[in-house]
Structures are given as C-alpha cells and as structure tokens.
Image (tube, rainbow, N blue to C red):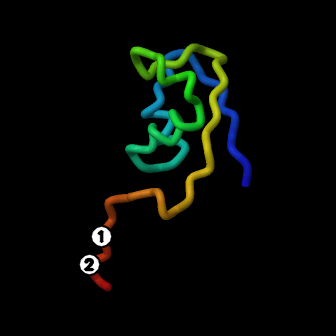
C-alpha cells in the first residue's frame, strides 16, 4: 500500500483528518512525521486545497483502547 495524498478543505484540522482516516484518536503525530513542514504551524488548521501526505500506519501502531475482557 502507498501513502495517500489528501487535499484539505477549508477548516480541516490534523486531528479530525487523522480520526477520519485512521478511525482512532492520537495519530496526528504520524501525519506530522510525514509532513515536517506542518511542524512550523501555530495551529492544526489547514488551508483549502493544501495537500498533505497521510502515511500508511501499521496496525501495531494503532491503540484503539479496546480491551478484550473475554479472552
């Protein structure tokens, strides 16, 4: 699988994009690692039509917070 290039809409934020794409909270850091230019930002808002890379994240890097109490 290859990384995804995402085109931002006005008002998009890294945290909401990360949640929408990965389905869990807390993976903004992966997007920042793939887009070091965003580290200079004072906030997480993106400009309309700004393109960012959404990296493929291995399942082992995703903590869903789910605890299987039946195992």
Q: How many marks?
A: 2
Badge number at residue 25: none
Q: Please identify the quadrant where the C terminus is shown.
A: bottom left
Badge number at residue 67: 1
Q: Please identify the quadrant where the N terminus is shown.
A: bottom right
Circle 1: is it few (<14), some (14-19), or many (20+) Cα within 10 Å? few
Tell me what residue is drawn at x 51 percent, y 33 percent.
Answer: 32
Tell me what residue is drawn at x 46 percent, y 16 percent.
Answer: 41
Q: Is residue 33 left or right of residue 26?
A: right
Tell me what residue is drawn at x 42 percent, y 49 percent.
Answer: 24
Residue that numbered label 2 is attached to: 69
**Secondary element at image label 1:** loop
Circle 2: is it few (<14), some (14-19), or many (20+) Cα within 10 Å? few
Disc 2 and disc 1 in contact, CB within 8 angstroms: yes
Q: Is residue 4 above or below residue 37?
A: below
Q: Is residue 1 above or below residue 18?
A: below
Depth check: 32 or 49 in front? 32
**Secondary element at image label 2:** loop
């Amino acid at each position: 699988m290859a990384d995804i290039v995402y085109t931002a809409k006005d008002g998009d934020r890294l945290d909401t994009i990360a949640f929408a794409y990965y389905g869990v909270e807390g993976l903004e850091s992966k997007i920042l690692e793939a887009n070091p230019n965003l580290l200079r930002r004072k906030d997480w808002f993106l400009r309309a039509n700004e393109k960012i890379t959404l990296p493929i994240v291995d399942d082992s890097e995703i903590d869903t917070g789910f605890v299987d109490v039946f195992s």
